Amino acid sequence: MFDTMTFTKILGAVCGTFLVMLLGKWAAEEIYHVGGHGHGDHEQAYSIEVESDGDEEMVEEAVDVAALMGSADLAAGEQVFARKCAACHVLEDGVNGTGPHLYSVVGRDIGSVDGYGYSGALVAQADVWGQDELFGFLESPKGWAPGTAMGFSGLGKEADRVNVIAYLESIGN
């Protein structure tokens, strides 16, 4: 049915197809990149001037967490903790879940829970879990401590973060 010559023809057709594709790619690069030069090696033919309103630098306002803590709701913080945090963290002292226990976490040294292996990225950011540190971390753990092993995306609402911090402060402190 199939002999050596048929297989040779099939192999030749496949190799020929790849050769044509390679030559076509090379020809297209030469034509569209003008001799192989990359983008940006020449001056723009036409540029559009855009007026700026003077706000070119976005200045991030510092949030006064202490002032926000006055309006914190412990019950709302408990609900947010139960929905978002309780899957990985435990509030019982000395008991670690997927994450370290959060008993008396406000004011505790970062990375100080015995028996839990931290990723090391947290310790480089701060020494103690204060309200400001927790506020930044809960907003975006990977943004606040790049390289952290915590896979949580964060709490987007300021009120949720403040409520959780207040709730955590009431546990063991």
Image (cartoon, helix red, strand yellow):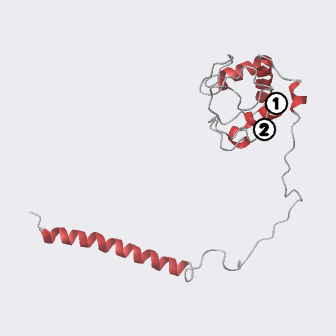
> Considering only vertical position in the picture, is 83 above or below 47?
above
Q: Looking at the rendering, in which quadrant would you find the C terminus? A: top right
Structural distance between the alpha carbons of marks 1 and 2: 9 Å
Residue extending furthest toward the bottom = 35
* Closer to us: 151 or 110: 110
**Residue 22 relative to residue 146: left or right:** left
Mark 1 crowdedness (10 Å alpha carbons): few <14, some 14-19, many ≥20: some
- Report helix, strand or loop for mark 1: loop
Q: Residue at x 13, y 69 (%)?
A: 4
Hey, what amino acid is under mark 1? Gly
Q: Residue at x 87, y 23 (%)?
A: 71
Q: Residue at x 48, y 77 (%)?
A: 28
* Closer to us: 53 or 97: 97
Mark 2 crowdedness (10 Å alpha carbons): few <14, some 14-19, many ≥20: some
**Tag 1 residue:** 130
**Residue 14 on image: x %, y %:** 28, 69
Hey, what amino acid is under mark 2? Ala
The label on residue 126 is 2
Q: Residue at x 60, y 75 (%)?
A: 38
Q: Are marks 1 and 2 in contact (CB under 8 Å)?
A: yes
Q: For residue 21, what is the image quadrant?
A: bottom left
